[in-house]
Image (cartoon, helix red, strand yellow):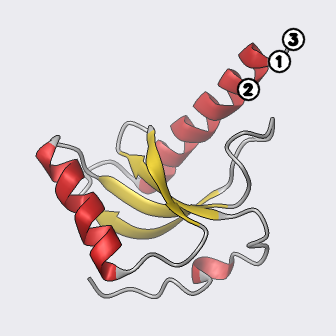
Amino acid sequence: MSRSLCNPNGVTDMTDARYVLISEAGACLGTLGRDVPSDDEINAAATKMAGAGVAGWVAIASHSFHSRRKPVLTMVTAVNGPLVPFATAAAVCGRTVAEAAKELTP
């Protein structure tokens, strides 16, 4: 899989960033960590997603999913040919995370 993962698309603050897997439905399926994932790591994730019939993206979440702020997601690469625009899935993911944080706050 050919791609440039070293600070793609102008993400400038990688302090609390991590590489994540986002489904077409906007679900955060997991993290690939803070370091640039290898082709093998991305291919292994793609294989697991394909086995579950899921397509999506590897993206950079610019800050923690555990904060109260909505994460800013930057697409890195598509996985398994998603049919939904990344922006649509990212908006759902961000809204879901922000709403969950509000519900968990006493």
Q: Is residue 54 above or below residue 34?
A: above
- Badge 1 vs badge 2, beta-carbon distance below 8 Å: yes
Side (left or right) of 24 relative to 15: left
Q: Gap between marks 1 and 2, in whole Å?
A: 6 Å
Which residue is the site of mark 1? 105
Which residue is the site of mark 3? 106
Q: What amino acid type should be assigned to the residue bearing mark 3?
A: Pro
Q: Position of residue 102 (x, y in %)?
A: 77, 20
Q: Is residue 8 above or below residue 13?
A: below
Which residue is the site of mark 2? 101
Local secondary structure at mark 3: loop
- Badge 3 vs badge 1, beta-carbon distance below 8 Å: yes
Question: Which residue is located at x 33 percent, y 71 percent?
Answer: 41
Q: Position of residue 77 (x, y in %)?
A: 39, 71
Question: Which residue is located at x 80 percent, y 41 percent?
Answer: 69
Q: Gap between marks 3 and 2, in whole Å?
A: 10 Å
Q: Residues within 10 Å of mark 2 (few under 14, many from 20)?
A: some
Q: Position of residue 86 (x, y in %)?
A: 44, 55
